Amino acid sequence: MQSSIQDYMQTLGKHAKAAAQFLAAASTKTKNDALLAIHEALIAQKDQILAANAVDMNNGRANQLDAALLDRLELNAARFDGMLQGLKDVIGLKDPIGEITDMSYRPSGIQLGKMRVPLGVVGMIYESRPNVTLEAASLALKSGNAIILRGGSEALASNQALAQAIQTALQQIDFPAAAVQVVATTDRAAVGELITLTDYVDVIIPRGGKGLIQRISNDARIPVIKHLDGNCHVFVDAEADFTKALPIAVNAKTHRYGVCNAMETLLVDQAIAATFLPKVAPYYLEKQVELRGCEKTQAILGQNVIAATEEDWGTEYLAPILAIKVVDDMNHAIQHINHYGSHHTDAIVTENFSKVQRFLACVDSSSVIINASTRFADGFEYGLGAEIGISTDKIHARGPVGLEGLTSQKWIVFGHGEIRQ
Amino acid sequence: MQSSIQDYMQTLGKHAKAAAQFLAAASTKTKNDALLAIHEALIAQKDQILAANAVDMNNGRANQLDAALLDRLELNAARFDGMLQGLKDVIGLKDPIGEITDMSYRPSGIQLGKMRVPLGVVGMIYESRPNVTLEAASLALKSGNAIILRGGSEALASNQALAQAIQTALQQIDFPAAAVQVVATTDRAAVGELITLTDYVDVIIPRGGKGLIQRISNDARIPVIKHLDGNCHVFVDAEADFTKALPIAVNAKTHRYGVCNAMETLLVDQAIAATFLPKVAPYYLEKQVELRGCEKTQAILGQNVIAATEEDWGTEYLAPILAIKVVDDMNHAIQHINHYGSHHTDAIVTENFSKVQRFLACVDSSSVIINASTRFADGFEYGLGAEIGISTDKIHARGPVGLEGLTSQKWIVFGHGEIRQ
């Protein structure tokens, strides 16, 4: 079985690479036509897709999947319409491919510049949401990449039905169907093969829990655009304007709890802790946010705060829990953020220009925010049109990743017969 | 021993990371002052450094290293001066750090843009040339990165002497000495540790033979900027101007043989093969370049050509040997290049604009060259000022990599108290 899985994945890889060569030179119109054909095929096959999803849902209930997982797995009519709208949105996005920049003459006479091109073949590994299948496929196609999709086993029927619609659409318009391939086995060995297909796959994008992503990063032999955790901070400086600091500190924690750009630790300068903390705490308590503070925080807020442990500073709660620490000054805050944070998104509230300069330079995070909520660190808020993921890596793509994250730039040289002297 | 190597490398990593935090906010002047101090320390310690190199050379001769390796190992007075000049050149380079681009307002009111920042800690693994120690150290410092250097065991004394000079210089000006650390053991386990120091090291740059680089890429748990082979092509199209095609085909092969951007296979459109090949062949034969051709090439050039095998198409000779293939047309040439090439540098010679468009879009190489020699694919010819390496990856840095390859861009947000609605 192992060797047949290997052969199967090699075949997917080979076909994807061939499709990628077609896609690299496909015009924007050709790619949009393919996306439109998929849009129509999805409408035509809606009943089959929802029926396949019902099979997954029944199996999920029989296998006693938890409620959150079942919710992510479900494709109802509203979500189906959302998927269709998402596809339309991708059609409307500017095609990043073919952009030529920085063309200039070199002393040798050659004209040198850069051209934006697709990465080639993307391998996507994700958990239960079937809508990711369509989202990833459409972003890959738009950016001229072939994609191999490996969804969760609990969504197999849904993903196969979506794949069926996509394949039908592509075949109808003579577009290489291997541009989008869905792995048709739930054998876990397929993931191991996919992330080591160095001859065929150019980048791996995992989406899911931290455990999955860590495992894939460790085992992959192909570059991985990964998103680990979001342990985000807001630092309220001694020179903060409280009319900004208060709404930001409340919004960053309580706007949504289960998101990676929510604040998990509030840092407060000791100079204003005794005035600021009593102002902000009632907002948290009103929303039943559990407060876990350092000793100084406890001294100021009293019994509303339980003692924070070392572990709290490194935890992404994704829940109505907030750690609070009083720090000596901004440098102490920066040290804390760089040590305990996850290099995702961190904010300062201050009116002091020089502190802003230092915070920007020293905080080693993919988004550094001045006087605004951490919740803005998001592909849609950043105007990327679509978000493939949020990268916590520093290499290639960092922070919210849009279509451009699926592209690369190659050097191009226009000569007139020049040779090296 | 294994565990003490692990502890040792962890300590280097920890110190490097601390130094990187200082470097991230260091001004251009501070960094240039450090480079100047190193320049002076090298002059002051020249005798010790050359003496240490003599020890390495003697050991190398005793261990019967081959002549090419001994040549790379040697630091004579001229090379020492070259090293000093290289350092001056890096001081003169524009500091890439702190560049802020693309600032614009979003509908939410926040002002969003990107800021160029150092990667953090660079791990460099290289073979015998001791001048790489200084080159890599100076480029890392200039771009605000700390670096851990692991040179070849045959250059240990030279590298330790260089490290001594660098450390002395940095300590004298109160610059964190851990900004540049040279691994002081030849134990190979140190490499295995370095490439898995995920908590401390942000990128690994290997320089050396293909075997070394492949091994490091396979075992690393940290992103690798790697340069594998350069199997470069020149395609002479049916619509080529021979006054350009002839010098380019000759220069790309014979300007230098042992370099990664030398042409290894010449592709010729069948429509002009019978006229072009007899014109170009004498230049190769005069320089004693061995010609290995397909059947059609042999039919045209006769006994001057030996039969090429399948293996020839995939080989980077780095020698006065050239493979020649007659192809049906440009699409055939593109297929050949993408299949057998190494995605490094490939050129077309043609006067046809539409073919240029297609060649640019379809050839999946880090440099795609029109009507010029492949030999231009080089950091200095591209005006990068310095070259850290040539990447054959598509992720992060592609093709010749300058200082910018050691940087990353983070998102920055300037708000006025905005919160997410």
Image (cartoon, coloured by chain):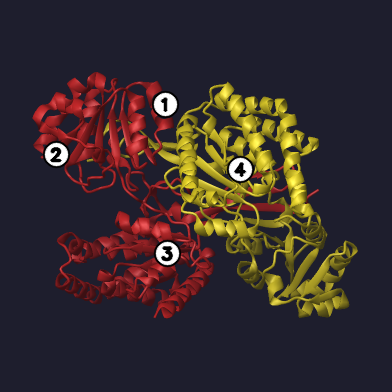
Chain colours: A red, B yellow
Q: Position of residue A218 (x, y in %)?
A: 41, 57
| Viewer-closest of B284 and B196 | B196
Q: Which residue is mark 4?
A: B402
- Output the chain of dot 1: A
State yes or no: discs 1 and 4 in contact (Cβ < 8 Å): no
In the image, residue A240 above or below residue B254: above
| Amino acid type indicated by mark 3 | Gly
Q: Is residue A394 visible?
A: yes
| Amino acid type indicated by mark 4 | Gly
Name the residue: 65% across, 73% down: B332
Label 2, label 4: how far apart the Cα atoms are: 49 Å
Q: Residues within 10 Å of mark 3 (few under 14, many from 20)?
A: many
Q: Which residue is mark 3?
A: A123
- Mark nearest the camera among 2 and 1 is 2
Q: Residues within 10 Å of mark 2 (few under 14, many from 20)?
A: some
**Are tags 3 and 4 found on a single chain?**
no
Q: Which residue is mark 1?
A: A357
- Output the chain of dot 2: A
Q: Which residue is mark 2?
A: A290
Q: Position of residue B389 (x, y in %)?
A: 63, 48
| Viewer-closest of B154 and A376 | B154
Label 3, label 4: how far apart the Cα atoms are: 29 Å
State yes or no: discs 2 and 1 in contact (Cβ < 8 Å): no
**Are tags 2 and 1 found on a single chain?**
yes
- Output the chain of dot 3: A
